[in-house]
Image: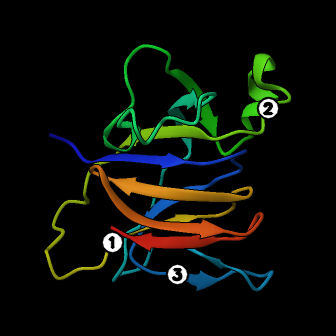
Amino acid sequence: SSPRLSSSLPRPRATPSLARGHMADTWGTLRPSDSAHRRCTQLDGLWAFIADHKDDGHASGFCSGLPESGRTPIAVPASWNEQLPELDSFLGPAWYERTVWAPLGLTPRQRVSLRFGSVNYSCEVYFNGERAGAHEGGHLPFEVDV
C-alpha cells in the first residue's frame, strides 16, 4: 500500500513538502530546493480533511487513516476557516491526510523529511500510522524525518 500522511493541525497554514535538504531563500528562512543531490516534491494541493469537533481523532484511529465518511477535500496551503464557511469560527483540532509516494531510486540510507512552511499553532505528524513528530509555535517552518 502507499504511504499515508496524517496530521492533526489546528488552523493550518501549512506548506508541506517531501525533501532531502534545504537552502536559504532571500528572506533568510529555509526552504527546500532541488539539486544534483536532493529531490524536493511539493505537497501543496488538495488534501483530505476532517474537523475533529469531538477531539476523538486519536481514539478513532485517524492517525492511521481518515474514514471515508465525513472527509472533505481542502486546499493546502490555506486556512480551513477561509475555505469552509461552516468552520469559519472553529478553532479546535482537525486532521489532514495525503497519500505520497517515495521518490524513485530512494535507498534506505537516504534521509526523507516532511517540511511544513507554517502551521498555526501546533500539530502532530503521522506517517504510515506512526507518529513522526510534533511542533508548537505559530507560523514557523519545521520538519520531521519519516
Q: Nearer the viewer, residue 60 or 141?
A: 60
* Image spot of residue 103 (x, y percent): 26, 60
On screen, residue 76 above or below 124: above
Q: Any mark on residue 22, and which?
A: 3
Asked which secondary structure carries label 1, the reply is loop
Residue 111 percent coordinates (x, y): 30, 79
Quadrant of the rendered structure where residue 35 is? bottom left
Residue sitting farthest toward the top: 69
Q: CA distance from mark 1 to mark 2?
A: 31 Å
Specify which label sits upstream in the sequence, 3 or 1. Answer: 3
Q: 58 or 16: nearer the eye?
A: 58
Question: Compared to 34, does 45 lie above or below?
Answer: above
Based on the displayed image, in which of its 4 quarters is residue 92 positioned?
Answer: top right
Answer yes or no: do the residues labelled 3 and 1 have beta carbons within 8 Å? Answer: no
Q: Are marks 3 and 2 in contact (CB under 8 Å)?
A: no
Residue hosting label 2: 81
Q: Earlier in the sequence, mark 3 or mark 2?
A: 3
Q: Amino acid at mark 1?
A: Val
* Nearer to me, 98 or 20: 98
Res 49 → quadrant: top right
Q: Is 56 on the left or on the right of 98, as rendered?
A: right
Residue at image location 18% in from the left, 69% down from the top: 106
User: Which quadrant of the figure contains the C terminus?
Assistant: bottom left
The residue at the far right in this view is 89
Mark 1, residue position: 112
